[in-house]
Amino acid sequence: MKGEGRLNIDRKILGVVSFGLLCALLLILTVNFSINTSSGVRAFVAGEAYWAKAQKEAGVHLSNYILTENPDEYEHFKSVLRVIDGDRVAREELQREHFDYDVVLEGFIAGKTIPMILITW
């Protein structure tokens, strides 16, 4: 009779400890998922900002080239277009079923998105 009560208490303690460990594990997994998700969203937003800035700069340099016919403005225009083209190349490669990591990496480097991408990958 004495051993029966002790066994019951041990099972209760084991159940409470098991439940606590399960909750801690689920909390760790949830936090890890949310950190990775928010990091990916930040990288996406930063990439969009670089793309929008490049688009605006391309328009400015092209307008300046039209007005001044300065070849440096046209070269700046072409260099800014590389950012937009790099993002396009990386996006198109990522949409393939078996994408080439090096092509994606080169596209992100050209699109100036690489610092955020390395953090999330």
Image (spheres, grey):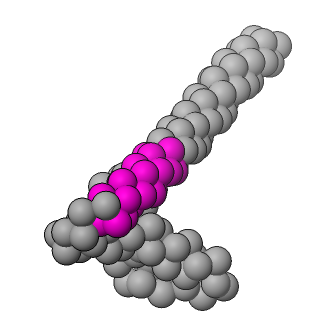
In-image side of 44 versus 5 (left or right): left
Quick one: quadrant of the C terminus? Answer: bottom left
**Quarter of the view holding residue 82:** bottom left
Q: Which of the pair 43/2 is nearer the observer?
A: 43
Q: Is residue 62 above or below residue 16?
A: below
Q: Main secondary structure of the magenta part?
A: helix
Q: Is residue 91 above or below residue 50?
A: below
**Residue 108 visible in the displayed image:** no
Instruction: From the top left corner, tell me how far across and down residue 88 is, in percent.
Output: 52, 73
Which residue is at a point 49% across and 79% down the rendered structure image? 89
Instruction: From the top left corner, tell me how far across and down residue 95 is, in percent.
Output: 64, 77
In-image side of 12 versus 71 (left or right): right
Q: Which of the pair 91/80 is nearer the observer?
A: 80
**Residue 92 visible in the displayed image:** yes
Q: Which of the pair 65/32 is nearer the observer?
A: 65
Q: Is residue 23 above or below residue 39?
A: above
In-image side of 38 versus 60 (left or right): right
Which residue is at a point 74% across and 18% down the rendered structure image? 12
Report how many numbered discs are placed on residues in the image.
0
Which residue is at a point 41% across and 73% down the rendered structure image? 86
Residue extent of the magenta highlight:
43-66
Quick one: quadrant of the N terminus? Answer: top right
Q: Is residue 19 above or below residue 56?
A: above
**Quarter of the view holding residue 111:** bottom left
**Quarter of the view holding residue 34:** top right
Instruction: From the top left corner, tell me how far across and down residue 10 is, in percent.
Output: 68, 20
> Is residue 47 covered in magenta?
yes
